[in-house]
Image: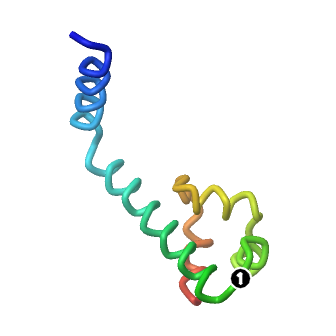
Amino acid sequence: MRHSQVTETLFNQAINETPQEIKQEVEWSYEIADKIYETLHRKGMSQKEFAHLAGTSEAAVSKWIGGGTISRWQHWLKYRRF
């Protein structure tokens, strides 16, 4: 079996074994990242400005935009007012 086939097999196995709850959280995180990114561009806002309004750090906003997990619900709830 070629290296790429082994990698694909292992990847598919990992996806199949991932609980639906985790898959949903990842999908949700990417949806939020898209919305934050769109808001920044629509309003001409910097990540720093957004972070200030959301009550978090610029590093956290950067992580969110990169698809990192948003673990603090209150930031998302604050974001919704945009």
How many circles with numbers are drawn on the protein?
1
Q: Residue at the spot x=27%, y=17% of the render?
A: 6
Q: Position of residue 15 (x, y in %)?
A: 27, 37
Q: Where does the C terminus fall, quadrant-wise? A: bottom right
Q: Residue at the spot x=74%, y=68% of the render?
A: 56
* Residue closest to the eye, 50 or 41: 41
Q: Where does the N terminus fall, quadrant-wise? A: top left
Amino acid under label 1? Answer: Met
In this picture, residue 54 sits left or right of residue 74: right
Q: Position of residue 13 (x, y in %)?
A: 23, 28
Dividing the picture into quadrants, the one containing residue 42 is: bottom right
Q: Residue at the spot x=73%, y=81% of the render?
A: 53
* Residue closest to the eye, 6 or 24: 6
In this picture, residue 54 sits left or right of residue 52: left
How crowded pointer 1 is (Cα within 10 Å; few <14, some 14-19, many 20+) is rated as few
Dividing the picture into quadrants, the one containing residue 14 is: top left
Q: Position of residue 37 (x, y in %)?
A: 57, 73
Q: Is residue 69 above or below residue 80?
A: above
Q: Is residue 18 above or below residue 60?
A: above
Q: Position of residue 65 (x, y in %)?
A: 58, 62
Q: Disc 1 on helix, strand or loop?
A: loop
* Residue position for label 1: 45
Point out the residue furthest to the top here. 1
Q: Is residue 55 above or below residue 28?
A: below
Q: Residue at the spot x=71%, y=82% of the render?
A: 45
Dividing the picture into quadrants, the one containing residue 78 is: bottom right
Q: Is residue 16 above or below residue 5?
A: below
Q: How is the image coloured?
A: rainbow
